[in-house]
Amino acid sequence: SPYGEYARSDELRFPAPRDRRHHPKTPTLGLRLADGTARAYPAVEVVRAGGQVEEQIAGHRVRVAYDAERETFSADAPADVEVVEGYWFAWMAFHPESSVFASTMRSSAGVTTLASQADRASKPYSSRVS
């Protein structure tokens, strides 16, 4: 590849704002609706959630999955939901008001379960981690 270690480095080849919640080159799947609603799914968060997330975004049911071995996303979303795959820094540069899926581990009565959480940034959603 002519880009060498670019995908692993913090280096950006052009000026872009930095959102330090994730490495700039974290693979990210973004969903965008015509009304401006936008939501990001960093691969690392989808993996922490067990590799697949199902949510309702502004009334649209979506499923996002990430296969860490193959380093690929898949998404099931209605036709009016635009699906965009790229690096974390690029998604956030173009969608700074985007909500962001984040997975956390929670323990209840000695049982560890996965639960999803989000940067709610005024965007309504509900989620289920599969």
Image: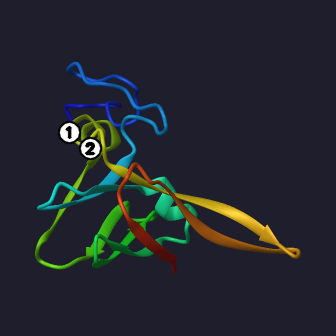
Which SS class for mark 1?
A: helix
Q: Is residue 50 above or below residue 100?
A: below
Q: Where is residue 116 in the image (x, y as percent from the top left)?
A: 55, 66
Name the quadrant containing residue 115: bottom right
Residue drawn where x is 55% and y is 67% of the image: 49
Residue drawn where x is 15% and y is 60% of the image: 35
Q: Which kind of residue does numbered mark 2 sit on?
A: Trp
* Circles 1 and 2 in contact, beta carbons < 8 Å: yes
Q: Which kind of residue does numbered mark 1 sit on?
A: Phe
Residue drawn where x is 39% and y is 71% of the image: 65
Kindly identify which residue carries mark 2: 91
Name the quadrant containing residue 10: top left
Nearer-the-camera pick, 108 or 65: 108
Which SS class for mark 2?
A: helix
Residue 37's label in the rendered image is none
Q: Quick one: label 1, few (<14), some, or many (20+) residues within 10 Å?
A: few
Compared across the picture, whether 83 is left or right of 21 comes to left
Which residue is outermost to the top? Answer: 15
Kindly identify which residue carries mark 1: 94
Q: Quick one: label 2, few (<14), some, or many (20+) residues within 10 Å?
A: many
The alpha-carbon separation of the residues under discs 1 and 2 comes to 5 Å
Compared across the picture, whether 114 is left or right of 54 comes to right
The N terminus, quarter of image: top left
Q: In this view, does 90 lie above or below 81?
A: above
Compared across the picture, whether 103 is left or right of 74 comes to right
Q: Position of residue 98 (x, y in %)?
A: 31, 48
